[in-house]
């Protein structure tokens, strides 16, 4: 089994006390540890904190969950008529990103949305969560549906590349996380995609005159370039779009685009839907969520939800504005 390439990305505080015992997944989910880098490399984040016991536990989890993802992917590809070994090597050598999210308990007058509406940039996301909080858009009714928390179950959804590869036969899942009024919540999203430099195109077997190819996409299988948090204040919903300081683009971006920058351009084209091909994805993609943009210096502007503006470059998350229920 190859060592998965995993990048930890976390929010919250770090205060877990080492007990000397290897924690169970339950302990892990209840812990307040937030800095986990399974590769054991120092992250670009200055306050990097390595919690060795979690690292073992998360390492095992990462390997196992990847095995499940590859099996599921094979079954989906078979279902699409492409055969389970379609692009086998690209999936085998693809990227896995484990994102550990910690959401505070909802308190009165506080924000109710932990993570704004978005779709994921991997083919598959496998989510383990400590409690209920995930909501998905039901495309038929165009409304939010709560994903029930089932004991001992993992939640799986598909992301943008799956929609592109399947040429729109499988739709990306728009989702968000809401805060739980009873407790803080931890979720571990394991996201599985092609390698950073691989483009995802529609399978030619699924392209014909009636169904022209979706526009190819690349990435963004990067650490997030921005972090988006939506908050509600009275009747006004705002979104906080923060670019953490450790993810600031180097100044060289302006003159010489780095892969991150190229990635943003790719997503911009993808979202605007220019060009001749009638991509189902681009037709259906709603406007991005309104957001309160926090600049590098931390200056914030509140904008009501109805006065939506658009922002490019949401990093790994593609924000959407499905109607609120
Ligand atoms: O915490 C959740 O329920 C969702 C997390 C998520 O969507 C993500 O990490 O991309
Ligand atoms: Fe997500």
Image: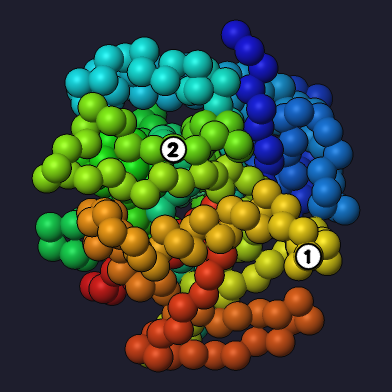
Quarter of the rendering containing residue 271 = bottom left
Q: Nearer the viewer, residue 22 or 324?
A: 324
| Residue 161: x %, y % from top left | 40, 41
Up the image or down, 8 lies above or below 176; here it is above
Residue 276 visible: yes
What residue is rendered at 35% in x and 73% in y? Answer: 287
Up the image or down, 155 lies above or below 255; here it is above
Outermost residue toward the top in this view: 1
Which of label 2 and label 1 is nearer to you? 1
Q: Which residue is mark 1?
A: 255
What residue is rendered at 56% in x and 60% in y? Answer: 265
Determine crowd level at label 1: few under 14, some 14-19, many 20+ residues with C-alpha closer than 10 A: few
Q: Which residue is mark 2?
A: 200
Q: Nearer the viewer, residue 2 or 24?
A: 2
Q: Point out the image quarter for the N terminus.
A: top right
Up the image or down, 44 lies above or below 192; here it is below
Going from the N terminus, do you reach mark 2 or mark 1 first? 2
């Amino acid at each position: 089994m190859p060592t998965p390439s995993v990048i930890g990305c976390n929010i919250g505080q770090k205060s877990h006390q080492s007990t000397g015992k290897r924690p169970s997944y339950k302990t892990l989910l209840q812990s307040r540890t937030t800095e986990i880098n399974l590769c054991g490399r120092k992250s670009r984040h200055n306050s990097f904190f390595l919690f060795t016991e979690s690292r073992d536990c998360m390492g095992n989890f990462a390997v196992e969950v990847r095995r499940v993802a590859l099996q599921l992917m094979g079954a989906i590809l078979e279902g699409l008529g492409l055969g389970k070994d379609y692009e086998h090597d690209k999936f085998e050598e693809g990227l896995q990103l484990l994102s550990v999210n910690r959401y505070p308990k909802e308190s009165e007058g506080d924000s109710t949305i932990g993570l704004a509406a978005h779709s994921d940039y991997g083919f598959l996301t496998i989510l383990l969560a400590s409690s209920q909080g995930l909501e998905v858009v039901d495309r038929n009714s165009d409304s939010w549906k709560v994903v029930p928390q089932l004991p001992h179950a993992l939640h799986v959804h598909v992301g943008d590349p799956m929609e592109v590869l399947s040429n729109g036969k499988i739709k990306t899942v728009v989702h968000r996380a809401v805060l739980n009024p009873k407790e803080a919540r931890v979720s571990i999203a394991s996201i599985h995609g092609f390698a950073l430099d691989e483009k995802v195109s529609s399978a030619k077997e699924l392209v014909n005159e009636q169904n022209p190819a979706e526009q190819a996409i690349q990435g963004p299988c990067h650490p997030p370039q921005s972090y988006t948090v939506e908050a509600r204040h009275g009747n006004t919903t705002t979104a906080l779009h923060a670019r953490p300081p450790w993810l600031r683009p180097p100044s060289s971006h302006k003159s010489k685009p780095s892969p991150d920058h190229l990635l943003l351009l790719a997503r911009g084209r993808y979202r605007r839907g220019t060009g001749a091909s009638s991509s189902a994805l681009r037709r259906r993609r709603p406007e991005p969520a309104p957001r309160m943009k926090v600049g590098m210096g931390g200056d914030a502007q509140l904008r009501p939800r109805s006065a939506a503006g658009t922002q490019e470059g949401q990093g790994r998350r593609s924000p959407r504005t499905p109607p609120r229920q």
